[in-house]
Image: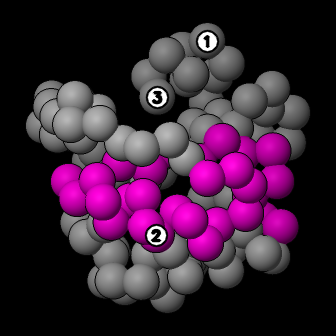
């Protein structure tokens, strides 16, 4: 995320922490709010949602926003502690099914979420 902002500027990448989202409706509202915040001339648009599996029915909330077309041209990257929940939940989303998550990917996810607490606080208020 930092690399995206450094390379392409503010308004090109946003971050949500699933641990602070109450439910799928709250997540949909926050994703919609962020989708509207991208710079109009942003060459890339990336949305990182960490610990998405902490949100009950996350796949329905994300699909709702996708179906409304609010995430066109946005790369959505999701991480979570429960890799099997990520795989099963993403099967109902538009596009190609993801490859099987690996233990090392889940481990990297946990390490990266612990390594950047300041980024999390700063992005949550963006």
Residue 89, disc: 2
Q: Is residue 34 visible?
A: yes
Q: Earlier in the sequence, mark 3 or mark 1?
A: 3
Label 3: state its secondary structure.
loop
- Choose between 111 and 82: the one closer to the eye: 82
**Residue placed furthest toward the front:** 100
Q: Earlier in the sequence, mark 2 or mark 3?
A: 3
Vertically, is 67 above or below 70?
below
x, y (%) of residue 98?
A: 55, 47
Picture residue at 42% right of the left edge, 58% below the top? 87
Picture residue at 56% right of the left edge, 22% below the top? 4
For label 1, the crowd category at 10 Å Cα-Cα, with few meaning under 14, some 14 to 19 and many 20 or more, is few
What is the distance, in whole Å, between disc 2 and disc 1 at their CAs? 31 Å
x, y (%) of residue 116?
A: 21, 32
Residues at badges 2 and 3 in contact (C-beta under 8 Å)? no
- Range drawn in magenta: 69-97
User: In the image, 114: left or right of 89?
Assistant: left
Residues at badges 3 and 1 in contact (C-beta under 8 Å)? no
Residues at badges 2 and 1 in contact (C-beta under 8 Å)? no
Picture residue at 22% right of the left edge, 29% below the top? 104
Residue 7, disc: 1
Label 1: state its secondary structure.
helix
User: In the image, 65: left or right of 81?
Assistant: right
Residue placed under numbered mark 3 in the picture: 1
Q: Earlier in the sequence, mark 2 or mark 1?
A: 1
What is the distance, in whole Å, between disc 3 and disc 1 at their CAs? 10 Å
**Residue placed furthest toward the top:** 7
> Which quadrant would residue 40 be assigned to in this image?
top right
x, y (%) of residue 123?
A: 39, 46
């Amino acid at each position: 995320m930092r690399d995206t902002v450094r390379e392409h500027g503010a308004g090109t990448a946003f971050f949500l922490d699933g641990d602070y989202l109450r439910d799928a409706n709250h997540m949909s509202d926050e994703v919609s709010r962020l989708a509207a915040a991208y710079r109009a001339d942003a060459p890339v648009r990336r949305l990182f949602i960490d610990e998405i599996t902490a949100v009950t029915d996350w796949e329905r909330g994300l699909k709702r926003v996708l179906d409304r077309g609010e995430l066109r041209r946005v790369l959505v990257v999701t991480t979570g502690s429960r890799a099997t929940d990520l795989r099963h939940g993403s099967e109902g989303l538009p596009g190609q099914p993801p490859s099987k998550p690996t233990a090392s990917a889940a481990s990297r996810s946990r390490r990266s979420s612990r390594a950047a607490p300041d980024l999390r606080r700063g992005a949550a208020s963006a």
